[in-house]
Amino acid sequence: MKLRLGLPKGSLQEATFALFERAGFRFKTTSRSYEPIVDDDEIEPVLLRPQEIPAYVADGVIDAGLTGHDWITDCGVTVHEICELRYSKLTNNPIRIVLAVHQDSDVRSVEDLRGKRLATEYVRLTNRFLADRGIDAEVEFSWGACEVKVPTLVDAIVVNTETGSSLRAHNLRIVETLLTSTTRFVANTSAWNEDAWKRQKLESLGMLLQGAMNAARLVGLKMNAPRAGLGDVLGLLPALRNPTISQLADEAWVAVEVILEERQSRDLLPKLKRAGATGLVEYPLNKVIY
């Protein structure tokens, strides 16, 4: 059997392939290929615009896919969410879908949009947002590059932003945030509920991808410590549960191993050395599954 899997083409493609590689799956593609090759005969991948993936998953054209919560919401379709994967093209932070105007605009709130013209890729999401507020405004679809249209072509835009740098570069300010979004691994409801093989495959993929996400912020640390000073060393160590302690051939020494946040390591290593630990080794992790 095959699992037809939709992967986001474009800005998220490189980060998605890197995540799958940490999870144990290697993809190969060419610049013009929409059907990558993966080292798993049970997966049939296809590259699609993330905007398209929710509808194709919901309709059963593909069994599952990775796309943003923003595009799922914009499409308004029903899919089964397997897990949240907090990664994006630049950081691991969520993106925001925001309403933005030029710094000199007289629009200070959503209510000021009455009779105005907006451009966005999120037409359905924006129309629902305005309708919920009772705002009558014209919303037009834009093929990207919305920032350059303000204020000469439109009065406002609804766009996604990760860092806000593009908005600042175009002298725009945010009026309101419509939605906060992260990447989601979603499945067709029939594939999930009615096909035992596909569900098991999807559950395994979800577990491995989440394990890779967990490992991205963690490192392993091992060291030797004198038994007489073990309390001082252990007092410095954080751990997922408890440090692993193993007896060395020399009964006066033990080996200590722990998993910790990578950002903690730079401050911790000198302290451990001063506390008497030796042979300190930090190593990367591929997957951490809770």
Image (cartoon, rainbow, N blue to C red):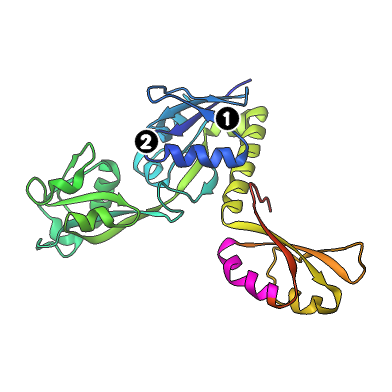
Q: Along the polypeptide, which appears first: circle 2 or circle 1?
A: 2
Q: The magenta stretch spans which residues? A: 262-273
Which element carries disc 1, helix, strand or loop? helix
Q: Residues within 10 Å of mark 2 (few under 14, many from 20)?
A: few
Instruction: Return the x and y of residue 9 as percentages of the image width and height.
Output: 40, 33
The three-letter amino acid code for the residue at tag 2 is Gly
Is residue 4 depicted above or below 259 in this figure?
above
The answer to whether residue 231 is left or right of residue 167 is right
Q: Is residue 212 above or below residue 173?
A: above
Q: Is residue 134 visible?
A: no
Say whether residue 268 is magenta: yes
Q: Main secondary structure of the magenta part?
A: helix
Where residue 10 is drawn, which disc sits there? 2
Q: Are marks 2 and 1 in contact (CB under 8 Å)?
A: no
Task: In this rendered view, identify the residue nearer to me: 236 or 282.
Answer: 282
Q: Nearer the viewer, residue 284 or 242?
A: 284
- Residue at 27 percent across and 56 percent down: it is 165
Label 1 sits on residue: 191
Q: Is residue 290 visible?
A: yes
Asked whether 282 falls inside the magenta stretch, the response is no
* Percent x, y of residue 281: 69, 59
- Per the model, the C-alpha gap separating discs 2 and 1 is 26 Å
Q: Is residue 289 above or below residue 280?
A: above
Kind of residue sitting beneath label 1: Ala
Can you tell which mark lies on residue 233? Answer: none
Quarter assignment of residue 143? top left
Q: Position of residue 47 (x, y in %)?
A: 43, 28
Q: Secondary structure at mark 2?
A: loop
Q: Is residue 238 left or right of residue 141?
A: right
User: 151 or 17, which is in the foreground?
Assistant: 17
Q: Quadrant of the N terminus?
A: top right
